[in-house]
Image (cartoon, grey):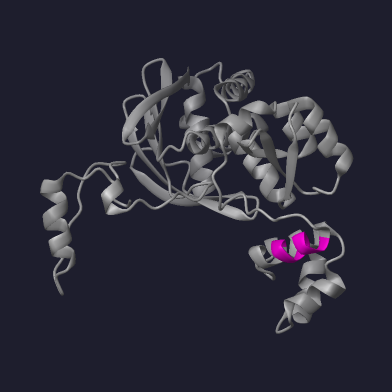
């Protein structure tokens, strides 16, 4: 990032085309300029794609098809940094940081047994979207088993062991990876909330999807305090206090984007109930018109009449996840 800071004065007030012609050079430098907020990502992507002769795709502004994801194994996408986007006319469109790598394109075509149409995307965005779109129940279970295998929770650990000790457990690599896996899988399932509820022997994880809660997995209650504390650490909350409700916010960097979350916890008989509201998405959602929202005519007709009023308030109510924001 030293190079980025050094270029700040150079890029300020300069024509981006002139900057590109003189300092773009390695793709890594361009991505540093984007992540440092010195260059607009869309403009940078357009300039670089023009230079290499391949179209640019912002992975956080498109929908990625499930059938395309299914055609390439996670091992290959993780190793090569390739993300399949869609299948159209028996051709697979894939995003790469180096779409000009013809040898890689040929290998991919041989693997999927269909023609490949490569497009350019930034490496950081590719890595982030691969983590999200290849998050599965199997990868979530693997992260859980790694966390439960730590050997730290055999004594039924809770916050009474002391702030430093529970913080050490919550900051362990296995617990961090497990909480990240919970988030990635929730993003993959397009959930609006993550509910983590401790019960007598197990903690239950549920995702709110389209307004309904779905069971995802259960894990030993001995791990619960570390998971809830991990979220509190992300929110910079007091991890030693579990007797009162707590609220906070945190952000998770995903490539050049950032997803925001709202955290809340409330004490219960067996520990703190946790709800994490997801305030963003990894893909742009198409906006529905009123005609496509399946609103009954008995509601739609007076609604249209009220929308034409020069003043007044329309109050939209409903439970969590019912579509108020939409």
Q: Position of residue 134 (x, y in %)?
A: 62, 31
- Describe residue 63's horizontal placement relative to residue 273 as left or right: right
Q: Position of residue 64 (x, y in %)?
A: 57, 41
Residue 147 versus residue 316 in the image, above or below: above
- Describe residue 39's horizontal placement relative to residue 234 as left or right: right
Residue at 86% x, 74% y is 22
- Describe residue 324's horizontal placement relative to residue 40 as left or right: left
Residue 201 versus residue 304 in the image, above or below: above
- Which stretch appears magenta? 45-51
Residue 42 or residue 296, whichever sits in front: 296
**Is there any visible trace of residue 277 in the rendered image?**
yes
Secondary structure of the magenta portion, mostly? helix
**Is there any visible trace of residue 168 in the rendered image?**
no
Q: Which residue sits furthest bottom? A: 13
Residue 169 versus residue 62 in the image, above or below: above
Magenta run includes residue 222: no
Residue 106 versus residue 312 in the image, above or below: above
Q: Position of residue 173 (x, y in %)?
A: 67, 33
Q: Quadrant of the N terminus?
A: bottom right
Residue at 76% x, 81% y is 9
Residue at 74% x, 34% y is 78
State which quadrant residue 264 falls in.
Answer: top left
Residue 222 or residue 43, whichever sits in front: 43
Q: Position of residue 169 (x, y in %)?
A: 60, 32
Q: Which residue sits furthest front? A: 89
Residue at 39% x, 36% y is 274
């Amino acid at each position: 990032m030293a190079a980025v800071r050094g270029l700040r004065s150079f890029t300020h007030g300069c024509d981006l085309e002139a900057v590109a012609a003189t300092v773009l050079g390695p793709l890594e430098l361009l991505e540093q300029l984007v992540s440092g907020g010195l260059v607009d990502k869309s403009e940078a992507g357009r300039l670089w794609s023009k230079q290499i002769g391949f179209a640019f795709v912002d992975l956080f502004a498109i929908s990625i098809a499930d059938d395309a994801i299914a055609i390439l194994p996670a091992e290959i996408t993780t190793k090569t940094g390739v993300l399949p986007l869609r299948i159209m006319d028996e051709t697979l469109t894939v995003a790469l940081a180096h779409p000009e790598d013809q040898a890689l394109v040929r290998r991919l075509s041989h693997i999927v047994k269909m023609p490949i149409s490569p497009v350019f995307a930034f490496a950081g965005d590719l890595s982030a979207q691969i983590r999200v779109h290849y998050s599965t129940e199997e990868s979530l279970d693997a992260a859980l088993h790694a966390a439960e295998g730590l050997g730290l929770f055999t004594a039924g650990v809770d916050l009474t062991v002391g702030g430093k000790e529970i913080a050490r457990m919550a900051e362990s690599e296995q617990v961090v990876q497990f909480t990240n896996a919970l988030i990635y899988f929730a993003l993959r399932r397009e959930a609006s909330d993550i509910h983590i509820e401790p019960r007598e022997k197990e903690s239950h994880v549920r995702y709110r999807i389209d307004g309904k809660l779905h069971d995802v997995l259960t894990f030993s209650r001995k791990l619960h305090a570390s998971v809830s504390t991990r979220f509190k650490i992300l929110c910079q909350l007091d991890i030693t206090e579990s007797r009162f409700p707590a609220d906070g916010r945190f952000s998770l960097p995903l490539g050049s984007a950032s997803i925001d979350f709202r955290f809340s916890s409330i004490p219960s008989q067996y520990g703190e109930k946790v709800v994490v509201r997801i305030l963003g998405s990894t893909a742009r959602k198409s906006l529905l018109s009123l005609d496509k929202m399946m609103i009954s005519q008995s509601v739609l007709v007076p609604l249209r009449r009220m929308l034409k009023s020069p003043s007044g308030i329309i109050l939209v109510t409903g439970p969590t996840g019912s579509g108020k924001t939409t």
